[in-house]
Amino acid sequence: MIVHCPHCSKGNRVPAEKLNQTPICGACKEELLSLPINATAENFNELVTQTVMPVVVDFWATWCAPCKLFGPIFERAAIAHANQILFVKVDTEAEELLGSQWNIRSIPTIAGFKGGKEIKRVSGALPPDELAEFLKPFIS
């Protein structure tokens, strides 16, 4: 799969089974998973179903004020749990098909996946302590 570096935006080919091995960007040499990955319709299913790590997805949009407030909280959680949980962001404005496919009716919506199956979902911007509680089932 192609994972775009959250630091320099360069596309990197990473086999899904190697996402838990601290992949490094070929261009800037930063860790690919140290910040949330921006998912697209092309890589979302592979990220969720073929990744051995649990996946937490933030469905959001650029025009959404609560989404903008929640973004830094989600990013701090991604930094804190790098290589334990794969943090993914889906811009539902740019990826309308994904929003529809996953029945996203309000944003932000946070969905957690294990083994390719959605196991938990919550709508609304979460404060840090509530996000930490949401993440507990995904931390090994």
Image (tube, rainbow, N blue to C red):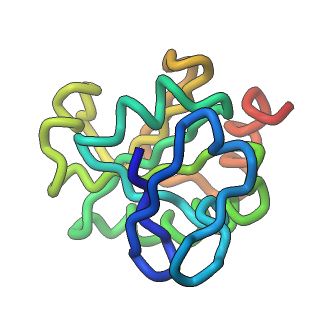
Residue name at image x 56 percent, y 40 percent: 56
Quick one: 102 or 14, which is closer to the camera?
Answer: 14
Judge from the rendering whether residue 17 lies leftward or rightward of residue 91; answer left or right. right
Check the picture and name the quadrant holding the C terminus.
top right
> Quadrant of the rendered structure where residue 136 is?
top right
> Is 56 drawn above or below residue 87 in the view shown?
above
Specify whether 119 is left or right of 62. Answer: right
In the rendering, at what x and y percent does residue 2 appear? 39, 52
Q: Quadrant of residue 43?
A: top left
Image location (x, y in percent) of residue 57:
48, 43
31 to the left or right of 103: right
| Image label count | 0
Q: Nearer the viewer, residue 28 or 132?
A: 28
Q: Position of residue 14 (x, y in %)?
A: 52, 49
Which image quarter is the N terminus in? Answer: top left
Examine the rendered structure and indicate whether residue 111 appears above or below residue 93. Answer: above
Look at the picture and state if 46 lies above or below 96. above
- Locate residue 70, reporting x and y percent: 50, 63
Tell me which residue sits at (67%, 34%) in the image.
53
Q: Residue furthest right?
A: 140
Name the residue at 69% across, 46% down.
130
